[in-house]
Image (cartoon, grey):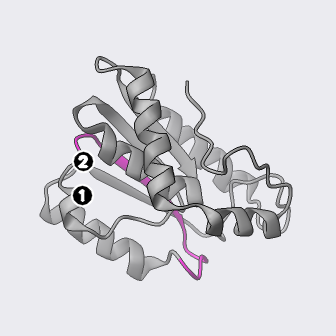
């Protein structure tokens, strides 16, 4: 298991810090970190990725970078990729877990992603929960939905069992 640190050692202890650190991440640096992790894992590695929110979007990016080594991707309410040329590089199934009350990563955004993936014949499963963004985060009691989080966890574990 490799835990990727895209915040370069900074630890967010509240939503404001998380938002600030997220905005500070430069894509070039993030891709360099992901490529370094993939190189460290080795050319014979089998890569499965998972991430929540910001990490959900980067889970998908890591899957794209992993290419043939990718064996599965789980993205919890993360921003989907929109570049069809990047989506063409996906070589493994993707599970997208989304919240119907999310005002940002909403049905319009996810439906477009789903349509692109279908047009490319890429394996994609989408699961919607009647919950808000961050519903699987128990440290955020105003949004945490225990039942949805437990169900989503079961799906994620079954999706990428290794």
Residue 73: percent from left, percent from top: 40, 43
Q: Is residue 46 magenta?
A: no
Q: Quadrant of residue 153?
A: top right
Mark 2 touches mark 1? (CB < 8 Å): yes
Task: Find numbered disc 1 in the image and state the secondary structure of the residue it sits on.
Answer: helix
The crowd level at tag 1 (other Cα within 10 Å; few <14, some 14-19, many 20+) is many
Q: What is the span of residues highlighted in magenta in the rendered image?
A: 91-104
Residue 16 versus residue 123: which sits nearer the camera?
16
Asked if residue 147 shows in the view, the reply is yes
Left-right relation of 127 to 123: right
Residue shown at the point (30%, 53%) measured from the top left: 124
In the image, is residue 123 above or below residue 158? below
Cα gap from disc 2 to disc 1, whole angstroms: 6 Å
Which residue is disc 2 drawn over? Answer: 90
Which disc number belongs to residue 87?
1
Residue 8: percent from left, percent from top: 67, 46
Residue 122: percent from left, percent from top: 20, 52
Residue shown at the point (24%, 49%) measured from the top left: 123
Please state, as top left, top right, bottom left or bottom right, where the C terminus lies in the image.
Answer: top left
In the image, is residue 127 above or below residue 65? below
Left-right relation of 25 to 69: right
Which disc number belongs to residue 151?
none
């Amino acid at each position: 298991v490799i835990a990727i640190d895209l915040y370069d050692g900074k630890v967010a202890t509240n939503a404001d810090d998380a938002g600030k650190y997220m905005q500070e991440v430069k894509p070039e640096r993030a891709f360099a970190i992901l490529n370094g992790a993939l190189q460290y894992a080795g050319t014979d590695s089998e890569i499965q990725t998972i991430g929540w929110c910001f990490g959900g979007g980067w889970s998908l990016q890591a899957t794209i970078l992993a290419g043939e080594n990718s064996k599965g991707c789980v993205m919890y309410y993360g921003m989907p990729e929109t570049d069809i040329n990047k989506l063409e590089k996906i070589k493994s199934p993707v599970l997208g877990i989304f919240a119907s009350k999310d005002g940002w990563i909403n049905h319009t955004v996810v439906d477009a992603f789903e349509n692109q993936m279908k047009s490319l014949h890429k394996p994609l499963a989408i699961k919607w929960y009647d919950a808000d963004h961050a519903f699987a985060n128990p440290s955020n009691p105003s949004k945490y939905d225990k039942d949805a989080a437990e169900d989503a966890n079961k799906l994620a574990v079954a999706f990428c069992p290794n």
